[in-house]
Image (spheres, rainbow, N blue to C red):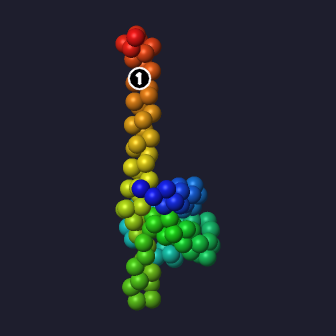
Amino acid sequence: MQTDRLDRAFAALADGNRRQILERLSEQDLTAGALAEPLEISRPAVSRHLRVLREAELVTVRIDGRERWFSINPDGVVDADVWLDELRTAWRDSLFALKSFIEGGDS
């Protein structure tokens, strides 16, 4: 897993508007205009957020005629999830070791 790709993913996910965009895209592919409708930000701002998400490889774009359709890139999301899962596993293992030590299982 590339560190710079993971850094871009988490930097992109740090913004609430981008997380809302990803949540909406998890339900269906949408155009920038459709994504902008329920958000309290301008269409140019949505476009900037989509650019950040594309650069982080969390979103892909498909051009159909004059429209650009955005969708989640599962590979980008999986990379972040794998890293988080590794962290969860290490933390859980540490807690189990601590519990075992406290209960006197490790001498």
Specify whether residue 36 is in view.
no
Residue type, numbered disc 1 = Ala
Q: Position of residue 24 (x, y in %)?
A: 45, 63
Is residue 31 placed above or below 53 in the rendered structure? Answer: below
Q: Nearer the viewer, residue 46 or 98?
A: 98
44 lies above or below 13: below
Q: Residue at x 44, y 46 (%)?
A: 84
Which residue of the protein is positioned furthest toward the front in this rendering? 107
Query: In the image, is 39 to the left or to the right of 29?
Result: right
Q: Is residue 51 visible?
A: yes
Image coordinates of residue 76 in percent, x first then y, are 42, 61
Residue at left offset 39%, top offset 17%: 100
Placement of 86 over or under 21, stated as above or below? above
Q: How many marks?
A: 1
Task: Write down the quadrant of residue 2 in the picture.
Answer: bottom left
Residue at x 39%, y 85% (from the top left corner): 64
Determine the secondary structure under disc 1. helix
6 displayed left or right of 44: left
Q: Residue 47's x, y, as percent?
A: 56, 74
**Which image quarter: residue 75?**
bottom left
Residue appearing at x 61%, y 76% in the figure: 44
**Residue at label 1?**
97
Spot occupied by residue 6 in the image (x, y as percentages of width and height) = 49, 56
Direction bottom: furthest residue: 65
Quadrant where the image shows the N terminus: bottom left
Q: Which quadrant is the C terminus positioned in? A: top left
